[in-house]
Amino acid sequence: LLFTFRFAADTMKAVLSLLGLLVALWAACDASQLACDYPPEQWCNSREIAAACQVEQQCVEFQHSSAEQPVDLWLFYESLCGGCRGFLVTQLFPVWLLLNDILNVTLVPYGNAEERNISGKWEFTCQHGPDECLVNTIEACVMHYLGNIKDSFPVIFCIESSHFVINATESCLQLYAPNLTKEKVMSCAKGDLGNQLMHQNALLTEGLRPPHQFVPWIVINGKHTDELQEKAMDALFNLVCNLYTGEKPVACKCGNTERNSLPIKTRNLCWH
């Protein structure tokens, strides 16, 4: 009986201790929630907020890991749009050549096209006609086969800067990607692979938030705003240097480079 009483007493003490610990943890958690009156996306905005939300160490680690992340730029465009060609040729490609260590570029040729499914196959209608649909698909196939933007971008630049865009594929491949034949690219562009690549570009374009209103449509670090669009089109070089939070490359330290900041006027946009 004495043993039973002691066992019950010891059990009761353990239960009471556990309850006390739970109450203490609840109080600490509740106090933390009261002090941390900020949404998660703001937790690392300042040391004070990080301390209030008890995520100081996590913020330090996050900021350290993200400090040297390249600027991420997605260009949604169509191959025969004058404004798209102007931005790609006179702004994006020269800036990428200078800053490719801190600038990731993704090209999505589709623009203001429309698609519909006919008997299981996608058919596309492009703003500047069938030739634009073909060149869009050619460029998608080039990027598919070459993979790395460092290999594919010079070919795309060559095509877009040519006087006769529709006829530039072979010479541009010979110049910048001699191991990729025109026959292989055209087989892709006119076959099922090209059809699926363009459908994927359609999904990417139609999934934009906010929806695109014109092309070129520029998304930087996952965001599109009127301010970012204007700055990118007026002075992309300066924008990339300013957005990069790591150690600036030599090109950025040399100051503004006007030759890489050629403005594209609104009248050259291709509206949706």
Image (cartoon, rainbow, N blue to C red):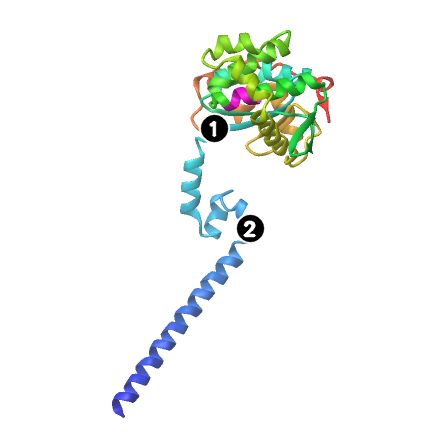
| Image point (49%, 43%), residue name | 44
Which residue is denoted by mark 1 in the rendering?
70
Which sits in the foreground, 69 or 160? 160
Q: Is residue 168 visible?
A: yes
Q: What is the x, y in percent for residue 172? A: 53, 10
Task: Find disc 2 in the rendering and name its residue.
Answer: 38
Answer few, some or many: residues within 10 Å of disc 2's Cα (few below 14, many 20 plus, some between 14 and 19): some
Provide the residue span drawn in magenta. 140-144
Task: Tell which of 49 and 155 is nearer to you.
Answer: 155
Q: What is the quadrant of the C terminus in the image?
A: top right
When the figure is inspected, residue 18 is found, relative to residue 87, above or below; the finding is below
Which residue is painted at 44% across and 44% down in the image?
A: 59
Picture layout, residue 30 above or below residue 6: above
Classify 10 Å Cα crowding around label 1: few (below 14), some (14-19), many (20 and above): many
Relative to 156, is 200 above or below?
below
Quadrant of the image occupied by residue 138: top right
The tag earlier along the polypeptide, 1 or 2, is: 2
Secondary element under disc 1, as helix, strand or loop, is loop
Nearer the observer, 155 or 117: 117
Element assignment for label 2: loop
Q: How many dots with numbers?
A: 2
Q: Is residue 240 left or right of residue 25?
A: right
